Image: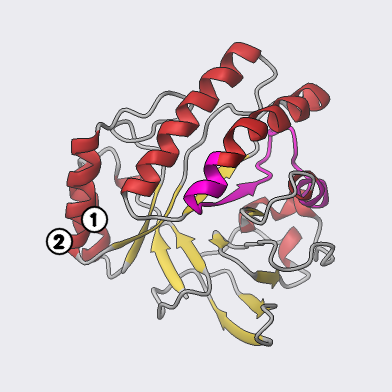
Amino acid sequence: MKVALDPTPFHHDYSLLELPRVVADLGYEYLQLTPHVDMIPFFNHPKADDALVTEFRKACASAGVGIASVLPVLRWSGPDEDAREAAVRYWKRAIQITVDLGVNVMNTEFSGRPEKAEESERAFYRSMEELLPIIEREGIDVLIDPHPDDFVEDGLAAIRTIRGVNSKNLGMVIVACHQFHMGGDLPAIMEPPATWSVSYMWQTPWIITVPTDFATSPIRQAMPFECINTSKSGTETSTGTNSSAGSANSASTIVTTP
């Protein structure tokens, strides 16, 4: 299991190249590369050239910190066609940055607009037609969060939307603090090797169950969870919280904020 820190709260106090050392000093072995003005900012073209990408990878190696995932947030499902086309271009560069960083997981959001859900869904599948061949060629797992105020907010609708792409490289992120949109326990309507995640957790091929009272409880500093590995090799169970660094293996990733 990888427990990774989301360094976003430190973006205003430290430069991009200082973040790996901050993460290491806090006792974490991994970080998630969230939107940063010098790398892949929210909704706009990535700002890092190859030299900066190389320097950031070196900074992570020097600090002894791995990059668990890259998280771009771009308008790839936007009902405005000009914005959607731009987002696809930005996505292509973000994928290249991810590959150059030696990372194979990208977490993201559906984007789009809930009041224009049909138009946004058409835009999403249109974008996937262009991006999916690149994603599959590069061996990237793209895991999508049905974020509040996206065109898909409901967990079951998100599963169906992802399943409709028909690719083993796409999966779902369930963020614990968005559970009020999910509605308690989600039935397992997707079969492995589809990807689920919870509590800022993602990675193939885990199905996560959350305590039934979690959907109505406030966000807590420590969020308990149970992870059930549904891989063909058998079923394994592990438990933990997002308040400690824990041990690392390749099974799953928890991303926590300080």
Residue 245, located in which quarter of the rendered image? bottom left
Q: Is 100 left or right of 95, judged from the image as shown?
A: left
Q: Which residue is mark 2?
A: 62
Q: Is residue 107 visible?
A: no
| Magenta span of residues | 134-160
Q: Could you tell me if the residues under marks 2 and 1 are in contact, i.e. CB atoms within 8 Å?
A: yes
The residue most toward the left is 62
Q: Position of residue 196 (x, y in %)?
A: 66, 62
Residue 239 covered by magenta stretch? no
**CA neighbours of label 1 inside 10 A, class few (<14), some (14 to 19), many (20+):** many
Task: Name the residue at 27% across, 37% down.
Answer: 12
Image quarter in which the C terminus is found: bottom left
In the rendered image of this protein, does residue 29 appear above or below residue 170?
Answer: below
Give the CA separation, mark 2 to mark 1: 8 Å
- Residue type highlighted by circle 1: Pro
- Front one among 141 and 78: 141
Left or right: where does residue 198 sit relative to residue 92? right
Inspect the magenta stretch and tell me whether residue 138 lies in it. Answer: yes
Task: Describe the element under mark 2 as helix, strand or loop.
Answer: helix
Q: Position of residue 144 (x, y in %)?
A: 62, 47
Residue 10 left/right relative to 83? left
Say which amino acid is labelled 2: Ser
Residue 74 lies, with reference to residue 227, above or below; the image says: above
- Disc 1 designates what residue? 20
**x then y, percent, for residue 225:** 63, 74
> Is the residue 91 above or below the residue 215 in the image?
above
